[in-house]
Image: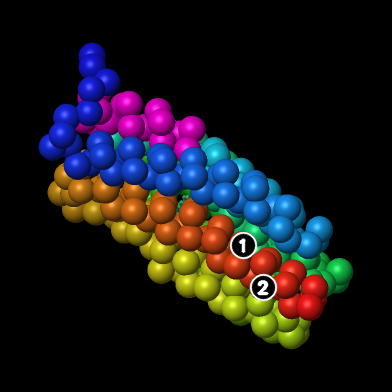
């Protein structure tokens, strides 16, 4: 077993690049906490925790890939089980940063949606359940999340806020959860419903997806936090 990264292992290199980007993003979010108003600090802490947790998983995933050329599926799911609920909670946190009346039901429904979505995905990937059957409730749970943020209570609270910074961030976050997140079920679909995509391609796609869905997602929140803080300071 060797941990040397060959110069032509582009998948391995993408693991390295994302690992380092996640480390840098973590430092950035934690330092920038100082710059924003108190009510925004929790959102930035959570953004930093997401990238920190993912960075540690990426170190392991990179090693698995470089040493074996196999997909580090278990590490991805452990990472998702921790980071995806945190990402979902961000919707509740950014709304709460500018309103004291955000119903807790939003928090619990989004959390429940992620747990069901990932639980069935994991059951399907590990053979605890038929992968094709597990796909259905997992997709339904993702649909439930999308419904909540586009048409459910969360979207209504957002519409009533009249805070342009939060509304802009909220809108971008909904697009990431819809378009950016679609990459993961597509990967699952190609893996279990077709002859399967090759492991290298799938890992590069997942790595790029994580860049958008974890780092860019956090930056959207950071931008709203800075803009809102500055608008009140002047
Ligand atoms: C940072 C990691 C993120 C944002 C991961 C998100 C993962 C998903 C949205 C996964 C969704 C799945 C389905 C909707 C159905 C098939 C099984 C999953 C778990 C791949």
Q: Is residue 60 magenta?
A: yes
Q: Is residue 176 magenta?
A: no
For the C terminus, the quadrant is bottom right
- Position above or below: 173 against 1: below
Furthest residue to the right?
100
| Label ID, residue 227 | 2
Local secondary structure at mark 2: helix
- The spot of residue 210 in percent (x, y) is 41, 51
- The spot of residue 212 in percent (x, y) is 43, 59
| Magenta residues, start to end | 54-70
For the N terminus, the quadrant is top left
Q: Which residue is mark 1?
A: 222
Residue, x 33% and y 32% (percent of image)?
A: 62
Q: What colour-coding does the image apply?
A: rainbow
- Position above or below: 173 against 56: below
Q: Quadrant of residue 41?
A: bottom right
**Residue 54 in sight from this viewpoint:** no
Residue 227 or residue 194, whichever sits in front: 227
Furthest residue to the top?
1
């Amino acid at each position: 077993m060797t941990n040397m990264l060959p110069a032509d292992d582009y998948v391995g290199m993408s693991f390295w690049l994302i690992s380092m980007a996640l480390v840098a993003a973590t430092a950035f979010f934690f330092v920038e906490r100082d710059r924003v108003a108190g009510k925004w600090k929790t959102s930035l802490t959570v953004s930093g925790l997401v990238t920190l947790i993912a960075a540690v998983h990426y170190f392991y995933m990179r090693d698995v890939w470089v040493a074996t050329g196999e997909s580090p599926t278990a590490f991805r799911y452990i990472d998702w089980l921790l980071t995806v609920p945190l990402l979902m909670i961000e919707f509740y946190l950014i709304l709460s940063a500018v309103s004291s009346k955000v119903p807790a039901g939003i928090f619990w429904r989004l959390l429940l949606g992620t747990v069901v979505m990932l639980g069935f995905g994991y059951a399907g990937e590990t053979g605890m359940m038929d992968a094709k059957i597990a796909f259905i409730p997992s997709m339904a749970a993702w649909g439930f999340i999308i419904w909540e943020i586009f048409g459910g209570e969360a979207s209504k609270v957002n519409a009533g806020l009249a805070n342009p910074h939060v509304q802009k961030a909220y809108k971008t976050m909904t697009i990431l959860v819809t378009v950016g997140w679609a990459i993961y079920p597509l990967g699952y679909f190609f893996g279990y419903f077709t002859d399967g995509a090759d492991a290298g391609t799938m890992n590069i796609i997942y790595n790029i997806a994580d860049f958008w869905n974890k780092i860019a997602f956090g930056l959207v929140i950071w931008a709203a936090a800075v803009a809102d803080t500055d608008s009140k300071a002047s």
